Amino acid sequence: MLPKATKAQFGLQRFASPLGGGLRNWLAHLGSVAWLGLTCVRHLLGLRTNQLGVLYDQTKLQVRFTALDALPLALLTSLLLGGITLIQVFAQMSAFGAETYLSQLLAQLVIRELGPLLVSVIVIGRSGTAIAAEMASIKLSGEVDALCAMGINPIQYLLLPRILGGIISVFSLIILFDAAALLGGFLVAWSRFPLSPQAFFHALGNAIQWSELIITFSKATVFGGLIPLICLSSGLRVRSSSTEIPQAVTAAAVASLVAVFLVGAFLSVLVYG
């Protein structure tokens, strides 16, 4: 028989062990992402002139896959979002005679929060998971070693184009998403509600201030670089088995979503207090 103190210590250890293991894995992943980000910045600053052509071609491919291929889905989602949001807001505000503030509220909701978050979710679901699976397959197949053997820097050839392509793609998609969402809101306001287009766009122009543009551009840049960086790190953490690829994809998606929501909340609080 174990003493009561020993039993209590054993029970506490069994309870705390999974928590400690999860925290250790989370910190290891965070350190891996930070190290990979610093490494990519160092190699970006060390690019030579003869390497810019390859980087441009690979980045262009990533922008086509991440932005152009996702554009129909993003535009459809944004049009529906703008219309549905305006309908819901009008239903609540019409009872208080505040219809004139519809466009201002729509602009602030879409530009500040909904646009960057939904675009990030679309990019994570389409491109982030693909990046994680691709990097895991490349590592398991030994293609990284083959690139090194051919004298090609794998960071400049594989990692930098995906990060730069993510920044450009998310930045472009957020701008188009916000514009389409506001257009959807205008179409609903013009067709169903007693709100003139002139009043709608006048209030919209007053609502879009520098603070909205700053928070949008900040989130676009940070999210665009953070999503591919996390997915690259998750894909490159696989060790020896192809069964780890689905786990890497799941970890990349979850970590990217958590990072986007946490960083988005931090930037919103930082700008708007």
Image: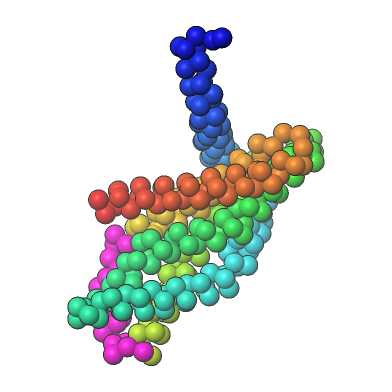
Where is residue 60 shown, x and y percent of the image? 63, 59
On-image quarter of the N terminus: top right
The residue depicted at 38 percent of the width and 60 percent of the height is 113
User: Magenta segment range?
Assistant: 192-212
* Vertical arrangement, residue 258 with respect to residue 187, above or below: above
Name the residue at 47% across, 72% down: 78
Q: Which of the two residues, 158 or 267, is positioned nearer the viewer here?
A: 267
Task: Locate residue 21, reporting x and y percent.
Answer: 55, 28
Q: In the image, what residue occupies the spot 64% across and 62% down?
A: 65
Does residue 32 appear in this view? Answer: yes
> Horizontal and vertical percent for residue 229?
56, 45
Main secondary structure type of the part rendered in magenta: helix
Reply yes or no: does residue 202 show up in magenta.
Answer: yes
Q: Quadrant of residue 63?
A: bottom right
Identify the image's colour scheme: rainbow, by chain, secondary structure or one colour.
rainbow
Residue 69, quarter of the rendered image: bottom right
From what the image shows, is residue 234 above or below residue 212? above
